[in-house]
Image (cartoon, coloured by chain):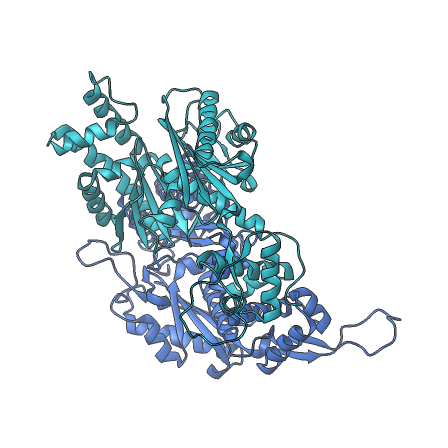
Chain colours: A blue, B cyan
Amino acid sequence: MSQDSEAAARLGDSSLLRRLNLAAALGAFIKSPSLTLRELREIVGVSRPTAEDLLAELLEYGRVEETAAPRQPAGRGAGRPARHFRFRAESGYVSGIDIGAHKTLAVVTDLRGNPLALHRRDLDPGLPAADRLRAAVDTARACWADAGLEPGDITGVACGVTGALRAPEGVFDVAAGPAGSGLTPYSLPGFTEVDVAAALSSGLGLKVTVANDIKLAALAEHWKGAAQDHRDIVYMFAGHRAGAGVLLDGQVHQGRHGAAGEIGALPMLGWESAVERLHARGAELAAGNTSMPAGREGELVIASAALQDPESIAVLIEFAEVLARGAAVLTLAVDPEIVVLGGGMSRGGAIIAEPFRRELSKLMLFPIEVVTSTMGADSVALGAARLALDAVFADLLDVPGVDPRS
Amino acid sequence: MSQDSEAAARLGDSSLLRRLNLAAALGAFIKSPSLTLRELREIVGVSRPTAEDLLAELLEYGRVEETAAPRQPAGRGAGRPARHFRFRAESGYVSGIDIGAHKTLAVVTDLRGNPLALHRRDLDPGLPAADRLRAAVDTARACWADAGLEPGDITGVACGVTGALRAPEGVFDVAAGPAGSGLTPYSLPGFTEVDVAAALSSGLGLKVTVANDIKLAALAEHWKGAAQDHRDIVYMFAGHRAGAGVLLDGQVHQGRHGAAGEIGALPMLGWESAVERLHARGAELAAGNTSMPAGREGELVIASAALQDPESIAVLIEFAEVLARGAAVLTLAVDPEIVVLGGGMSRGGAIIAEPFRRELSKLMLFPIEVVTSTMGADSVALGAARLALDAVFADLLDVPGVDPRS
């Protein structure tokens, strides 16, 4: 009936309560350099026999090991010293991959999420799907080799890709709009015809989860970026294209079809024409500049706007304003704590951020805090690593075992 | 790190685990006519001593009592018969109040949410705030008297009011747009200058929680209406005005300022002019019809459209289409399982529902199920009762006690 009793009704089997205790124990170890049994018991709030069972289970699965006691202040009394245990962050590794129009990028982290290596390869925006997927597989393998790891060391892999995604029962694959809808959300060449998750899984020999890249960038912003202190976040992506993602309670809000945040599909927002004008201006400025790498035209527009080029300034203001209209829509829809402006164009500084803030505040019922992303070009790959990490812990907590409380 | 471990980190004290067990026990009793200790133990999934502690606590707080055994099939074996216990739905009562432009309405239910009485009073839309609040207080008291209850019998009261609301730390009061914003969301006369919660609490001698009426109608639809099988819901209100509410995981998604769903404030949706045209057409049709009660003009427009009046048909189609545009915005923002079309105008049938569905499906990336509300004019008051019930159970589960698992 109440939120608590509904939550508890779902807890109506003891294995879920056991998992919650195990999760709490694991969380306690992840947050501390080391813990004694007494400390574990106090943090998780369980009886001594339960704490012993939890510790035994984590030791058995190799996630925790005994370690030397941290340096003690002198004269701490006699008696047998307590045994100390630590989380084995190196007991598994996860990898996050980003497949975009102009690059593919992979990171690998330990189970605490500390990055060990990053590998990047530039791609031609017209590259066919099969070649793009092969490049992503090669990049991930190169990244793992950089960190001195074999594929067998990798516990989980996730990948962010550009495009709207479906999420039937948690399995993602790239989707276009419904047949005959006339809606074809932006996606990579050929990606509406391949099963990205299957192709990457087969190429890497590991199960790969695929998610929308902008949602993963939002997750990275919450994990390691500008939105670490907030749990309800609207993330606006200003890059070679425009996009949005929503985090609620610190998790990506996927929605029923994995489409939450896909407001760019609404013609009334005018995103498509603003993005087209930005690309056209970038192409004009790049004409004759053959050394300009593909996908960096936005930087040219920003640079020329900084030199007071009126045409580039007008194009960027329009781009910022249509993005702000999308932010207003999402902010009124979910009423978040904060709006994050991210993506490569957000690094253009005030020239994007000021018209964005001005237009957004005009449309709001209440003042809303806007921050600019502090993440770099690795945000999607890091968000993917975080998603893989979540899956590893979810698996870990699903192991069978006796109920430690009975 | 993972969702489970984050949830568990918040569970880092044993009292919360104890509350979850207590909530599960209470939920089990609410769902069954009666339970034995063995049945309770099996449903909650705890050891016998823990189940005994939980039962003792619920007995002590008067929420459960021993009852006669249900009729048994003959020859069920010898031995001492098991004792049976039942939830005391009559151990408390909650009341839900609706304060609208044209009426105030109150319901009272037992702790299982069964309505015992409903009382309604029509109001003049221009009635000053103080008189409107007094009428609501009188209506609630009359409702309680209808059910044979004294104010002292009422455990919790919540009230839905028309208007955008702020929710600082869970306390709601009516708010207009920020000063100088030019935005003045629809609210009842004078209600931006009074503390509605304080006025009702003082008038009734009980703490009253105040919430936005449309969000409560959405909650009622999930509780007892067309959306009982769904947890992620976009609710569109088509009545004397237009509005929306979002439920996520079966709960009202309030957002940071209690403003989630307030997309009507976006000028690009064109809600205001469509509602004005509806009112104007209703006023034209009502001219000379002095017996027409205030606030029922929409019914006149629907009736004349059913008689093929082209002007009324055009006005209703426009109203349905702008509402559909709002539904598209919210559906792309949160990607719900279902869209519910509610409010008095939704009872106009196909004349509203068909253009609504058509326009919504044009704007969507994916097909979305649309259902029409099955609730009547008491939906806001019932949603308020449900909110009050949630608060009663939350309080109940916060009682101090020993950890039943240690």
| Horizontal and vertical percent position of residue B109 | 44, 43
Q: Residue at x 89, y 71 (%)?
A: A75
**Residue lying farthest left?**
B308
Q: Residue at x 38, y 56 (%)?
A: A296
Q: Is residue A183 left or right of residue B33?
A: left
**Quadrant of residue A79 within the rendered picture:** bottom right
The correct choice, above or below, for A10 with respect to B107 in the image is: below
| Horizontal and vertical percent position of residue B295 | 30, 26
* Res. A263 visible in picture: no
The correct choice, above or below, for A167 with respect to A70 in the image is: above
**Total tally of numbered discs in the picture:** 0
**Quadrant of residue A311 within the rendered picture:** top left
| Horizontal and vertical percent position of residue A304 | 40, 46
Q: Nearer the viewer, residue B371 or A338?
A: B371
* Res. B245 visible in picture: yes
**Quadrant of residue A323 within the rendered picture:** top left
